[in-house]
Amino acid sequence: SEIPIILSEIEKRYRKKTIFISGSAEDFGSWNRDDGQKFIHSLSSGLVKGNFRIVNGFGWGIGSAVINGALEAIYRNPEKYSEDQLIVRPFPQFGDNLKVLWEEYRQRMIALTGVAIFVFGNKLSSGKIISANGVNREFQIAIERGVVPIPVGATGFAAEEIWNTINQDPDRYYPGLSWIVPLIKELNNPNISRSDLQAKIVKIIQRLNK
């Protein structure tokens, strides 16, 4: 009777080494574009160096920085890191029932992971910058699947909205992980340096895997 419980725990621990990076950015808000992409690049590189796997759907304004950061770390030390640490699933852009396809893509990507990082999250609609509903949907899926959410509120937009949602009831989103709550709160500090922000995120994920 204990075998299913043990197998479930093994699966959870395995998936926590695979990190989903959710985000899109037509606008980088208080960040300039170069700083925003350098931050994503550094974060992705730091995750690979921490021996984590990255899953990404090539979000607008974000995806290339994720890929470049991961590959830079991998190619600088190919004996230690592997291309298997980067899983990219670009969303289809043509075809019938794209919304259905996108939902299936999101479900499959997030099912591979145990931790989800949310950054920025906006898009251009009718000439205006609005919150990216796709990023918010990925947050919902992550919670449904028991994935640990890490919203980087300091990047603004959907990520900040998700941070606010979690901050209203952290026990709901982090059951049994009371230690993580003050660390997540720090990720909403707009005055924190980009390097410190990246380091804090990696440290949270490392602790989740202990």
Image (tube, grey):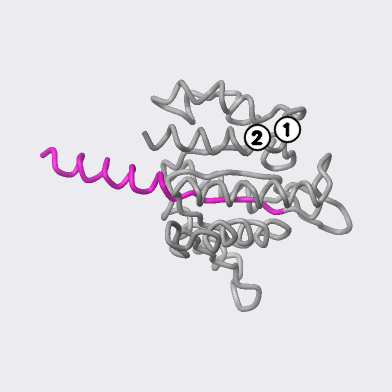
> Which type of secondary structure does the marked residue at label 1 adopt?
loop
In the rendered structure, which amino acid carries the disc numbered 1?
Ser
Residue drawn at (63%, 32%), measured in percent from left and top? 163
Mark 2 in CB contact with mark 1 (< 8 angstroms):
yes
Residue drawn at (68%, 29%), measured in percent from left and top? 188
Q: Residue 33 carries which label?
A: none
Q: Nearer the viewer, residue 106 or 64?
A: 64
Inspect the magenta stretch and tell me whether residue 199 lies in it.
no
Residue 201 rendering spot, x and y as whole percentages: 57, 36
Determine the image quadrant of residue 3.
top left
Residue denoted by label 2: 197
Outermost residue on the right side: it is 127
Residue drawn at (60%, 23%), measured in percent from left and top? 168
Inspect the magenta stretch and tell me whether residue 23 lies in it.
yes
Residue denoted by label 1: 193
Outermost residue on the left side: it is 1
In the rendered structure, which amino acid carries the disc numbered 2?
Leu
Determine the image quadrant of residue 159.
top right
Residue 35 rendering spot, x and y as whole percentages: 78, 46
Mark 2, other Cα within 10 Å: few <14 / some 14–19 / many ≥20: many
Region rendered in magenta: 1-24
Residue 121 rendering spot, x and y as whole percentages: 70, 48
